[in-house]
Amino acid sequence: MTQRIEKDFLFDTAIHFENGFYINQYQITLSMLVNTDVIKEHNIALERIHYFISHRIQSSLFIEESETKAIQKYKAAGINICTLPDEPHDQIISMVLLTKFNAITENKLIITDLILGSTFSEGVKFHTVSEIAEDIIDQHSSKWWNCATICMEDSKLENSGEDHKIIELFSDDAWEKLDLGFSKKGKKVNQKLDHNT
């Protein structure tokens, strides 16, 4: 039986907007359908969202992907960058995050709705549903928000003569190293041996 759950998150992230640097606080509510009968998979999916928010998005910087010079400067200053397809308005951020959360939960949870408000929105909250986000946000597989890894930027192409090599910013192994991998090819989810036997 499918069950609906909700969870709230709070995080602080900088934004680059109109050549300025601003700190903004966001609050989001996710409405999700549990799409697995395996409780551990459901818990891992939630932990992936929590990890992505608290270790990747928190204290990073939202910036439009076309702002290449500013991106290089922020990276040189050691700031984690989260690129967006447009200026970092709350509506765009909500659609990108909803899409990313659906990617990293790998269909164990289905995020149907995301409500996002921020300090700058002065009490206005944006309610985004997955169908709208899918219609507006680029669904190409090279976009980081469609990728199940912990990346926040698109994969880069490295030109080496006529060949193009894709440089992966993060691989699926990152979730495994964090003990947040799902079962693959019939294996059980992160089952560890009991050393007491």
Image (cartoon, rainbow, N blue to C red):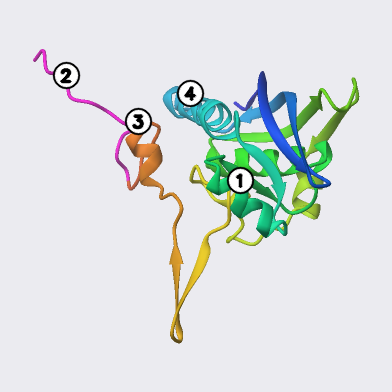
Residue 126 is situated, as x and y percent measured from the top left of the image, at 85, 31
**Mark 2: amino acid:** Asp
Distance from label 2 to label 1 (Cα)?
A: 46 Å
Query: Do the residues under discs 2 and 3 have CB atoms within 8 angstroms?
Result: no
Residue 70 is situated, as x and y percent measured from the top left of the image, at 68, 52
Which numbered disc, 4 or 2, marks the residue that appears first in the sequence?
Answer: 4
Distance from label 1 to label 3 (Cα)?
A: 30 Å
Residue 21 is situated, as x and y percent measured from the top left of the image, at 74, 37
Please, which residue is most extreme toward the bottom here? 162
The residue range painted magenta reads 186-197
For discs 2 and 1, the disc positioned in front in the rendered view: 1
Q: Helix or strand or loop: what does disc 1 sit on? A: helix
Rendered image: mark on residue 194: 2
For discs 1 and 3, the disc positioned in front in the rendered view: 1
Q: How would you rate the neighbour count of disc 3 (Cα within 10 Å): few for under 14, some for 14-19, many for 20 or more?
A: some
**Mark 4: amino acid:** Asn
Q: Helix or strand or loop: what does disc 4 sit on? A: helix
Pointer 1 residue? 74
Which numbered disc, 1 or 3, marks the residue that appears first in the sequence?
Answer: 1
Quarter-of-image position of residue 67:
bottom right
Pointer 3 residue? 179
Q: How many numbered tags mark residues here?
A: 4
Pointer 4 residue? 43
Q: Main secondary structure of the magenta part?
A: loop
